[in-house]
Image (cartoon, helix red, strand yellow):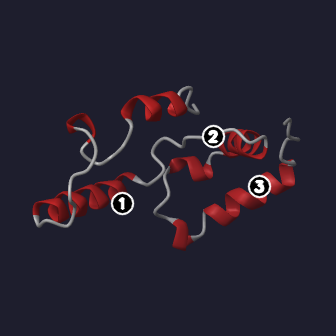
Amino acid sequence: AASRPLPRRALRRLRRLLARPELSFLGAWAGNESMLAELHTRLSSGELAVVPDFLGADVAEAVREDTLRGISMGWLRPVGTPMSRLGLDGPLLAEVASPSLP
């Protein structure tokens, strides 16, 4: 299904909303109007949209460290195939992630 572009005014409002301090954990995409417009187009037409660097670098690193620490403490029981110990389907993930947003 085709979608209409997000009006410029709505795009600016969205960017301002995403710039709020409580959303500072988001990556740089949240302040990129062209990225937001592309996300709107894809999502409103029913497409899958992958947001590279969804989290800011500091937050992503903290999540990674916490996850690794938790795994070492037994928080996570491996599932899936040896190639996908977290149960993710690597080929499917690669397929839906391509082409990714700029």
Q: Amino acid at mark 2?
A: Leu
Q: Tag 1: residue type?
A: Val
Q: Nearer the viewer, residue 49 or 9?
A: 49
Residue extending farthest to the front is 80
Give the position of the N terminus as an image quadrant. top right
Residue that lies at the very extreme toward the left in this rendered image: 72
Say what amino acid the circle numbered 3 marks.
Arg
Query: Do the CB atoms of the residues marked 2 and 1 lie less than 8 Å apart?
Result: no
Side of 55 relative to 16 (left or right)? left
Q: Which class describes the residues within 10 Å of circle 3: few (<14), some (14-19), or many (20+)?
A: some
Mark 3 highlights which residue? Answer: 12
Which of the two labelled residues, at mark 2 and mark 3, occupies the earlier sequence position? 3
The foreground one among 96 and 56 is 96
Locate residue 15, reporting x and y percent. Answer: 69, 56
Q: Residue at x 57, y 31 (%)?
A: 102
Tag in front: 2 or 1: 2
Which residue was labeled with disc 2? 48
Secondary structure under tag 3 reads helix
Circle nearer the N terminus (2, 1): 2
Q: Give the distance between the C-alpha atoms of the residues marked 1 and 3, in whole angstroms.
A: 25 Å
Q: Residue beneath label 1, please?
A: 59
